[in-house]
Image (tube, helix red, strand yellow):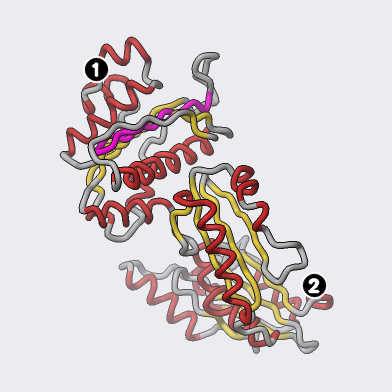
Amino acid sequence: MALGRCRYVLVCGGLGPTTDDLTRFAASDALGARLVEDATSLASIEARFRNRGIEMPEVNRRQALIPEGAAALPNPAGTAPGVLARTGAGAWLVLLPGPPAELAAMFDAEVRPRLERESGRTGGRVRETLMVAGLPESVLQERILDLTPARDAADRLAILASGGEIEIRVTGPAGRSAEVRGLADRIAERLGPAVFSRVAGEHLEHAVGRLLERRGERAAFAESLTGGLIAERLTRVPGSSGWFDLGVVAYANEAKRDLLEVPEAALLAHGAVSEAVAMAMAEGARRRSGNAWGVAVTGIAGPGGGSVAKPVGLVWVAVSGPVSLTRRFRLPGDRPLVRQLTATAALDLLRQTMLAAGEQRGGEAEGGEAPG
């Protein structure tokens, strides 16, 4: 059993109120401690339901059960408290809820500080983060290969790709924070405008919002294959109403024509998935909203609908504004991934175009095929 072999055992999930949530009972057996009701946890669960105007179901009461002698860990984002228990042999058992938002917040607030104190490594590491877009992971690696530290160096570099964005983490001992920061600065200089943030966990929608706010401008989006994913990402950002006010899901050709005033001739001559239609959609969104920028996406997400001329994964993104830009992408993956990558590509193209507009107003620029 893990508690007999490890100093720390973390278990995630199974703390819900239903009969298949058995983690607390398994922990009780493992620790040889009966389950008791924690009054503070129960009050917190009851208050959470009360604040929503709902009477707490009796079944939720079991979430307040913890092994006798253990400590309950508060969960500000959910009903299931965590549990922190220590065995007679000195091992730690930590139970955390499964939903990622709850788990991550509780680990950072309640578990990490305890583990650091217990291990004597409090404040022992520093980290610099760079958020990157517009580059495939392999291309990024090649560009910074000579900057990458050796395996046994004090600094450590990790490259984590997800959904078209890449997070670069540079870590090292706290006593060498200047070296860690220096390496991150050299990487940022090498990658140039591909770096859109130096804040961990920040995404393109935050960077786009900052640029629009700084310029005092707004953007409207016309989405076909993404079906509203771009608007959803933008409205995650607090204060997005200051720079985003219109998103149109124009899936059918009739919607493109009637809502965005895409010329029938363009649809007939080039098809919905084309540079001409993408730009007409962006111009229509800009015109209908009266905003400085209009952005549009159209493409083939699959799994069907592709052809030799227009294969699955073909996407056109267009930006209409003080500087206009179109970009053709061939994106990999299944339908959900193609849609996710398209949303990221659209946000990054708007970001790049706004950066170009800072130096070049009223001009036209057109990009070729971007790496996908």
Residue ID at (31%, 53%): 211
Query: How many C-alpha atoms fall within 10 Å of the one at disc 1: few (<14), some, or many (≥20)?
Result: some
Range drawn in magenta: 312-327
In what element is the residue under mark 2? helix
Q: Quadrant of residue 290?
A: top left
**Measured along the vertical axis of the image, is residue 227 above or below residue 112?**
above
Horizontal relation, residue 244 to residue 131: left or right: left
Residue 74 locus on image (x, y percent): 50, 79
At label 1, which amino acid type do we have? Pro
Q: Which residue is mark 1?
A: 263
Depth check, mark 1 against mark 2: the one in front is 1
Nearer the observer, 111 or 364: 364
Report which quarter residue 289 is drawn in.
Answer: top left
Q: Secondary structure at mark 1?
A: loop
Residue at the image position 37 percent from the left and 20 percent from the top: 272
In this rendering, position of residue 236 left or right of residue 313: left
Question: Disc 1 versus disc 2: distance between alpha carbons?
Answer: 66 Å
Report the front residue among 214 and 231. 214
Q: What is the chief secondary structure element of the magenta stretch?
A: strand
In the picture, the quarter occupied by the N terminus is bottom right
In-front residue for pair 187/298: 187
Mark 1 or 2, nearer chain start = 2
**Residue 350 image point, x, y percent:** 35, 42
Residue ID for mark 2 = 2
Q: Residue at x 43, y 81 (%)?
A: 43
